[in-house]
Each structure stands twice: as structure tokens, then as C-alpha cells.
Amino acid sequence: NNRPHVCPICHVRFSRSYNLRTHQLTHDKNRLKPFSCNVCEKGFARKHDRDRHVSAVHTGEKSFECTVCGAAFARKTYLMSH
């Protein structure tokens, strides 16, 4: 399996142990969330997640387009599921 590292809480799989450790921080309710959205004030543990949130939720930007039907998505994972 190319994703041997499994989160014991939500069972999401990762290819690298570092990514699993970083992911596990999202489950810690006591962890500070220093990166907040300047629009809705939602907090995030990682800057990348805050930036992705702003792009997907508040700007309406949909950078990932289906080459078959032209449907557009805010995240690559949404396109891949489509």
C-alpha cells in the first residue's frame, strides 16, 4: 500500500508519517489555531488550510476543471471524485 500511515481517529491514510503527525493535530481540540480567516474568523492550525479555506469558500475560485464536461471545482480532490 502506498499509504501505510493511518490516522487512528478518522482512518485517513497518508504516504508519509510526517503528514499523519501533522494531520493528527487537527483532532486536538486544545491546540491553538493561530491562523484565522479575515472574513469569517474561523481558526486553522496551519496557514495552508486557512489559505485553502479562503480561496474555496470566500473567493468562489474554482481552479480545477473537468476536461470532459467543463465542471469546475475549488479543490483537486473534488475534481478527482467527480
Image: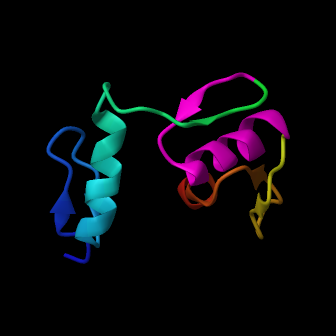
Q: Position of residue 63 (x, y in %)?
A: 79, 59
Q: Residue at x 76, y 46 (%)?
A: 55
Image quadrant in which the C terminus is located: bottom right
Q: Residue at x 48, y 34 (%)?
A: 33
Most extreme residue toward the top is: 40
Whether residue 45 appears in magenta in the rendering, the answer is: yes
Of residues 26 and 76, the one nearer the viewer is 26
Direction from residue 4 to residue 29 in the image, left or right: right
Q: Position of residue 26 (x, y in %)?
A: 36, 39
Q: Residue at x 19, y 38 (%)?
A: 9
Q: Residue 81, relative to residue 27: is it above or below?
A: below
Most extreme residue toward the bottom is: 2
Quadrant housing residue 41:
top right
Q: Position of residue 58 (x, y in %)?
A: 80, 34
Quadrant housing residue 5:
bottom left
* Numbered label tally: 0
Q: Residue 35, relative to residue 13: is it above or below?
A: above
Of residues 56 and 45, the one nearer the viewer is 45
Direction from residue 4 to residue 28 in the image, left or right: right
Most extreme residue toward the left is: 8
Image quadrant in which the N terminus is located: bottom left
Q: Residue at x 20, y 49 (%)?
A: 7
Q: Which residues are magenta?
A: 40-59
